[in-house]
Image: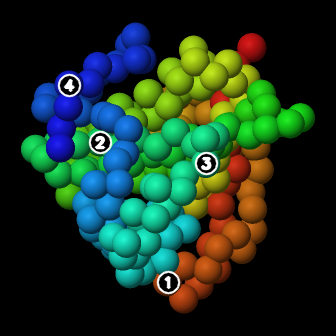
Amino acid sequence: MTQACFPIATNARWPDGLTIRARLAADAAGIASLHNLPGYRHGTLRTPYHSAEEIRKGIENQPATVTALVAVLEDQIVGDIGLTRHAGRRAHSGSFGMGVHDAYRGRGIGSALLGEVVAMADNWYNLRRLEMTVYADNGAAIALYRKFGFEVEGTLRTFAFRDGAYVDALTMARLRA
C-alpha cells in the first residue's frame, strides 16, 4: 500500500526506499504488529496485545486535530508518529508520540518521521511549541529529540508503570521564535 510521497521537510534525508505517508484504516494490522513489539511498547505508554480492530477504530475515529503518519519500508510499517494540535489558549502548541520497529532502529527512520512532524508544525500549522514526554531511561529517543532542538523542561517522577515498576519521564519541548 505504498504511494509516491515526498518529504515536506526541506532538509529531509530519508533512508533509501522509505516512504512516509498518512496512516490508513487498511494499515491497522501492520500498526498493531508494530505496537505489539516488545521494544516499541517499552518506549511508549502502550499496553500489550493491541488488536488490529482496536487500531482500525482509532484510525476511523481520529480527531481532525491529529495528523498520523506511518513509515513504510519494503511494504512493511516500520514506524509511526502522531501529531496532536492543541486548541483554545494552547492553539500555538502541539504534542506528539512516535515509535520505530525494533528491528529497524538506528537507520534514520525516527529522524525522518520527526523531521516531517517538525516541518508540519513549523510551516503548515504555525505551532510555536512542540512538546512530548519520554521515559528518562530512553537515551536514544532523548538524543533524537535533542538533535531536533528539544530541551528537557522537567522530570515527571513515577510517571508510568512499566514492566512491573514505576519509571520516570522527562518532559521536553521545542520552542520556535
Q: Which residue is mark 4?
A: 4
Image depth: mark 4 or mark 1 in front: 4
- Name the residue rendered at 57%, 14% in the picture: 123
Q: Which residue is mark 2?
A: 71
- Name the residue rendered at 44%, 27% in the picture: 115
Label located before the other in sequence (2 or 1): 2
Q: CA distance from mark 3 to mark 1?
A: 30 Å
Look at label 4 and name its amino acid.
Ala
Q: Secondary structure at mark 2?
A: strand
Image depth: mark 4 or mark 2 in front: 4
Q: Which quadrant of the rendered structure holds the C terminus?
A: top right
Q: CA distance from mark 4 to mark 3?
A: 25 Å
Q: Secondary structure at mark 3?
A: loop
Q: Which residue is mark 1?
A: 163
Label located before the other in sequence (3 or 1): 3
Look at label 1 and name its amino acid.
Asp
Look at label 3 and name its amino acid.
Pro
Q: CA distance from mark 2 to mark 1?
A: 27 Å
